[in-house]
């Protein structure tokens, strides 16, 4: 078995923050410089739809003081109503964030737009975006299954309203906020379970605490947005895979530099620490409203199985669940997840994707509508084990990490999908091989 040792300063920039930085830049007055933007397909899809809508976007590589090269994106806009009608359908590829969050902006434009995606995105639920935008006065058409194509007949006359989120979704919260920036008055978005709060932080929105641990996000309408620079920290959801590599392989110790440590994203670090993992955060500091810092992860042979069921925890670790499940299964032959039906609506049905792949690797799983369990002794298969990515970057990466920790010969279909969020995934792993 290999050891993985070293220090990484080239994690992909945070995908959620980068999408938002580009979208906010398209609404700002002036020139926005976004430092450390991702070359991953998802973030590039957001730049593509902005360009197709007449927004000036330039990318260049810049050498920075730590010796690494970062991607800088410069976006020019004249404020809230700068978008032009695209001459074709807007292709969002695999990126649900692009399709959903950009819909909020398009709903406020006085023209018709159509958003489409790849085979995975065309199956994902879109009623959650249509409902609030219809309430604000836009006309939204979906397929009979309430999926894309999303046809938006936008209006300059969106109404402000109070919207209680029916699902804990940061994408829906953000698209309502982006639409509300154009509305004629103040909108309130109420969430009962906290989801990632980058949009609130980046737009400087007021957040009021309500009874029953609910929160109300206040979005002022038609207030000009001044262009300002953004610096994107490392993606904690990408870090999770490299952390798992460190925790699972004897003798490993990995330091990840400049990772976003926003508490709405780092629930997985707490879960792992409580289960006995050797993880530390260091050098924690504030940059541009976000907490960032370094993460040190070392081989952790005596971990306990992970068990995830509290709805607030599920919402916090939603993108990390595939890796957490695979890690817990490989290290302890145990895992349990409940209250996570939302996982079935991601880039793949991540409950059945993880279960079917773990079963191929000889684990005993039980699958439920809202989660799954792993228990009992694994019976390791002989020879090559074909594992399906289901065209889902996080499924492919979770099992690529399992491949290095189990002495199994795992063959992952369609591993190129990893480029959606982590184009240098295999390069980083190789650089850590001691
Ligand atoms: C995201 C929110 C989450 C997450 C996705 C990114 C975001 O989706 O799964 O990868 O950047 O707002 P939901 O809003 O559907 O929960």
Image (cartoon, rainbow, N blue to C red):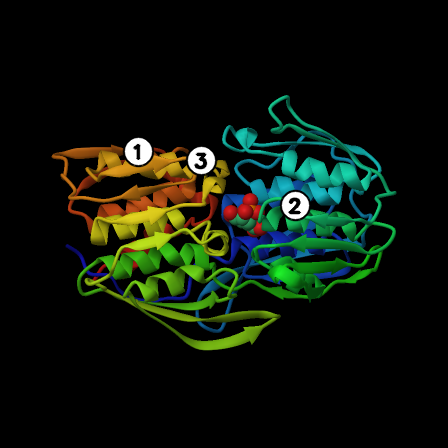
For marks 3 and 2, the one nearer the N-term is: 2
Left or right, residue 303 beside residue 77: left
Quadrant into which the C terminus falls: bottom left
Cα gap from disc 3 to disc 2, whole angstroms: 19 Å
For marks 2 and 1, the one nearer the N-term is: 2
Percent across and percent down for residue 261 are: 48, 67
The vertical placement of 99 against 262, above or below, is above
Quadrant into which the N terminus falls: bottom left
Percent across and percent down for residue 240 are: 38, 57
| Residue underneath mark 1 | 356
Cα gap from disc 1 to disc 3, whole angstroms: 12 Å
Can residue 22 be seen in this snapshot?
A: yes
Q: Residues within 10 Å of mark 1 (few under 14, many from 20)?
A: some
Q: Which mark is residue 204?
A: none
For marks 1 and 3, the one nearer the N-term is: 3
**Residue at 67% over, 39% down:** 129
Q: Secondary structure at mark 1?
A: helix
Q: Is mark 1 within 8 Å of ligand 1?
A: no
Q: Are marks 1 and 3 in contact (CB under 8 Å)?
A: no
Q: Is mark 2 within 8 Å of ligand 1?
A: yes
Cα gap from disc 2 to disc 1, whole angstroms: 31 Å
The vertical placement of 213 against 92, above or below, is below
| The one of 60 and 151 positioned closer to us in this rendering | 151
| Residue underneath mark 2 | 101
Q: Residues within 10 Å of mark 3 (few under 14, many from 20)?
A: many
**Residue at 76% over, 47% down:** 179
Q: Residues within 10 Å of mark 2 (few under 14, many from 20)?
A: many
| Residue underneath mark 3 | 348
Q: Give the mark toward the camera: 2 or 1.
A: 1
Q: Secondary structure at mark 2?
A: helix
Percent across and percent down for residue 183 are: 83, 49
């Amino acid at each position: 078995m290999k050891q993985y040792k070293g220090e990484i300063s080239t994690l992909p920039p945070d995908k959620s923050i980068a999408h938002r930085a580009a979208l906010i830049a398209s609404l700002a007055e002036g020139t926005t410089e976004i430092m450390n933007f991702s070359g991953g397909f998802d973030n590039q899809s957001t730049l593509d739809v902005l360009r197709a809508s007449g927004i000036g976007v330039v990318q260049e590589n810049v050498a920075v003081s730590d010796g690494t090269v970062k991607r800088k994106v410069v976006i020019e806009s004249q404020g809230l109503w700068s978008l032009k009608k695209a001459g074709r359908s807007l292709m969002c590829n695999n990126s649900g964030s692009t399709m959903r969050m950009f819909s909020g902006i398009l709903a406020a434009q006085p023209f018709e737009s159509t958003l489409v995606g790849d085979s995975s995105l065309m199956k994902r639920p879109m009623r959650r975006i249509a409902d609030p935008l219809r309430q604000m006065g836009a006309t939204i058409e979906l397929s009979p299954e309430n999926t894309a194509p999303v046809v938006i007949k936008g209006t300059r006359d969106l109404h402000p309203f109070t919207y209680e989120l029916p699902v804990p979704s940061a994408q829906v919260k953000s698209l309502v906020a982006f639409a509300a920036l154009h509305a004629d008055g103040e909108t309130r978005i109420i969430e009962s379970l906290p989801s990632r709060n980058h949009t609130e932080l980046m737009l400087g929105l007021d957040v009021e605490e309500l009874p029953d641990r609910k929160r109300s996000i206040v979005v002022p309408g038609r207030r000009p947005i001044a262009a300002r620079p953004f610096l994107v920290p490392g993606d904690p959801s990408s870090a999770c895979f490299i952390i798992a590599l460190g925790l699972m392989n004897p003798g490993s110790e990995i330091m990840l530099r400049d990772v976003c440590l926003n508490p709405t994203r780092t629930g997985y670090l707490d879960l792992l620490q409580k289960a006995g993992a050797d993880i530390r955060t260091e050098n924690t500091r504030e940059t541009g409203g976000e907490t960032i810092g370094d993460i040190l992860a070392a081989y952790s042979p005596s971990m306990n199985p992970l068990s995830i069921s509290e709805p607030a925890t599920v919402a916090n670790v939603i993108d990390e669940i595939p890796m957490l499940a695979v890690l817990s299964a490989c290290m302890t032959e145990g895992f349990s997840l409940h209250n996570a039906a939302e996982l079935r609506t991601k880039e793949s049905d991540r409950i059945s994707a993880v279960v079917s792949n773990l079963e191929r690797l000889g684990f005993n799983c039980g699958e439920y509508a809202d989660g799954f369990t792993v228990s009992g002794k694994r019976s390791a298969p002989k020879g090559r084990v074909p594992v399906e990515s289901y065209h889902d970057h996080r499924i492919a990466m979770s099992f690529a990490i399992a491949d290095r920790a189990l002495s199994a010969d795992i063959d992952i279909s369609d591993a190129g999908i990893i480029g959606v969020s982590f184009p240098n995934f295999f390069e980083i792993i190789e650089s850590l091989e001691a």
